[in-house]
Image (tube, rainbow, N blue to C red):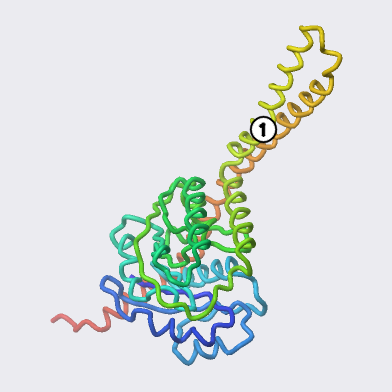
Amino acid sequence: MKLIIQIPCYNEAETLEVALNDLPKHIDGIDVIEYLIINDGSKDNTVEVARNWGVNYIVSFRNNKGLARGFMAGLDACLRNGADIIVNTDADNQYCGADIEKLIQPILRGEAGMVVGERPIDQTEHFSPLKKKLQHLGSWVVRKASKTDIPDAPSGFRAYSRHTAMRLNVINEYTYTLETIVQAGRQKMAVTSIPIRTNAELRPSRLFSSMFGYVKKSMLTIGRALMMYKPLYCFSCIAGVFGITGIALGIRFLIYYFNGNGAGHVQSLLLCTMLIIIAVVTESIGLLGDVISANRKLLEDIQFELRKMDYGKGHEELRKNKDNDKKEKMPDEK
């Protein structure tokens, strides 16, 4: 059983070594632990720090591509290098490395394919009261959108089984945390969470420049993910608002019309007609989106099979090499 711990990095030379030193070197049930960083166009000596520490794999971008792109590139590299379990953590040492052992336990027991670390948000001192409330609100919205019970959706401290990692697709360029939960929930993947600890803050968060920007991008990410996986539901809700309003105005016009006052309320009839047309068009878009969503599911199944063929070759070779090494170490029987 091979575990690869990946760390997305962007100008993390000052904190990376602290985070690496905190990672576990041995875990019961794991044969090999390796380490990977994603250098997302860093301008400092992040890569040099990683190499001097002894990181096994380095994925480098020439320019900054964002957290989501870096996360997917890291998953790809971990899968190609034979990871059975992948853990994602942060370079600022926000999460306690010792908790990786309990983070992967649901995967080792076969209970889940994706495990999200639940931070003690209310007890985290460097989170402002507003940020705490927004974290809870955002997680609640994700739970409703994904139909999961993950209490800390923005947490980047996660573990993935090999099978689940091959299923993941991140479309937005902002962050992977929210979209992957919505995707996993809508695709009926086994997702769970466990309480984890956090360390003292070494630097401010770089994911967003303002609280308003964070909320706006998070809501757009959740909405986009929900529309991708449940387009008919989303557009039907929107069409329902226009349709019900239009019908109400139509009924209002008819009441006035039968009472002999219809000539003075033609505007209501025009608005009623316009709203009903908008509702019909919106519902039609939802139906088209539902067809596209069904086709995308087929494409995702094809992509998964191609990934199994692609990643599986290297995985099997690593398994064979490992078995051969064991045979060479065994004494000859006489």
Residue at horizontal 42%, vertical 59%? Answer: 163
Residue closest to the eye, 256 or 193? 256
**Where does the N terminus fall, quadrant-wise?**
bottom left
233 lies above or below 206: above
Find the residue positioned furthest to the bottom. Answer: 52
Residue closest to the eye, 40 or 110? 40
Question: In the rendered picture of this protein, how many numbered marks are placed on residues?
Answer: 1
Residue at horizontal 53%, vertical 74%? Answer: 8
User: Is residue 260 shown left or right of residue 61?
Assistant: right
Find the residue positioned furthest to the right. Answer: 263
User: Is residue 116 shown left or right of residue 131?
Assistant: left
Q: Indicate the position of residue 169 as horizontal and vertical percent values.
A: 55, 58
Circle 1 sits in a helix, a strand or a loop, which is it? helix
Query: Which residue is disc 1 drawn over?
Result: 239
Q: Indicate the position of residue 317 as horizontal and vertical percent values.
A: 41, 72
Q: Indicate the position of residue 135 as horizontal and vertical percent values.
A: 49, 59
Residue type, mark 1 in image = Ala
237 lies above or below 123: above
Residue at horizontal 34%, vertical 79%? Answer: 24
Residue at horizontal 43%, vertical 71%? Answer: 125
> Which corner quadrant of the image does residue 109 belong to?
bottom left
Residue 305 visible somewhere in the drawing: no
238 lies above or below 152: above
User: Is residue 137 shown left or right of residue 259?
Assistant: left
Residue density around tag 1, few if under 14, some if 14–19, many if 20 or more, within 10 Å: many
Residue 176 visible somewhere in the drawing: yes
> Which corner quadrant of the image does residue 88 belong to?
bottom left
> Which corner quadrant of the image does residue 197 belong to?
bottom left
**Where does the C terminus fall, quadrant-wise?**
bottom left
Q: Indicate the position of residue 267 as horizontal and vertical percent values.
A: 83, 23
